[in-house]
Image: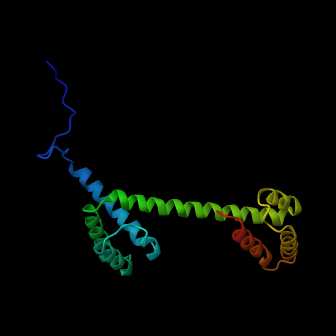
Amino acid sequence: MNTEPSHEPLLDENGDPIKSKTQLKQEAEDLKKIGGILVDLTPGQLNEIPLDDELIDAIALAQRINKKKDGFRRQLQLIGKLLRSRDMAEIESAINKLRAHHLKSNTHFHLLEELRDKIVDKGDSAIQELLNEHPQLDRQKLRQMQRQAVKQRETEKPPKAAREIFQYLKQNIEE
């Protein structure tokens, strides 16, 4: 005789596993967090996510409410409730796509900052390395901006030339 308890999940009348109260609360909390992410997005970013008018209106209202007030919390709960009846796979996929693009942009931005700092600090050797990777850049222009950036740093003036180097790199090096 087998005395071990059965670990098979209980099924409802449709054959779906019955979820515990804890699981239901966790899912509701997860949807509320996704609602919070949606509220923090800009209108342009929201346009890239497949949302219906009811959800867009609820998100717009939440964006207008002061985040320290109780109404904001209730509005997030409403957004979570609305999300329960939506296809979350598409929405989560769109959010992840936005996050990946943001991460890629940040990485590119930091790379450009490092290249600028390297050019200002090391001069011609850094410019040559950069030209080996990106031959479309103008050596003479980079050297001129580098000399100006060094002069500004030595005289403790604002780093206008360093900003110009960054902008030049940003315009000429693709992500």
Identify the residue shown where x is 88% and y is 75%. Answer: 151
Residue found at the far left of this picture: 13
For the image shown, how many numbered marks are present on the structure? 0
Residue 70 seen anywhere in this rendered image of the structure? no
In the picture, measured across the screen, residue 74 lies left or right of residue 68, that is: left
Identify the residue shown where x is 78% and y is 79%. Answer: 158
In the rendered image, which quarter is residue 6 located in? top left
In the rendered image, which quarter is residue 173 located in? bottom right
Q: Position of residue 32 (x, y in %)?
A: 33, 64
Residue 125 seen anywhere in this rendered image of the structure? yes
Q: Position of residue 83 (x, y in %)?
A: 29, 64
The residue closer to the viewer here, 107 or 21, is 107
In the picture, measured across the screen, residue 98 lies left or right of residue 53, that is: right
In the picture, measured across the screen, residue 147 lies left or right of residue 165, that is: right
Q: Position of residue 161 (x, y in %)?
A: 80, 76
The residue closer to the viewer here, 27 or 96, is 96
Q: Position of residue 175 (x, y in %)?
A: 64, 62
Is the residue 121 above or below the residue 67 in the image? above
Identify the residue shown where x is 80% and y is 61%. Answer: 135
The residue closer to the viewer here, 101 or 20, is 101
Is the residue 115 above or below the residue 45 in the image? above
The residue closer to the viewer here, 89 or 1, is 89
Identify the residue shown where x is 59% and y is 64%. Answer: 105
Residue found at the far front of this picture: 136
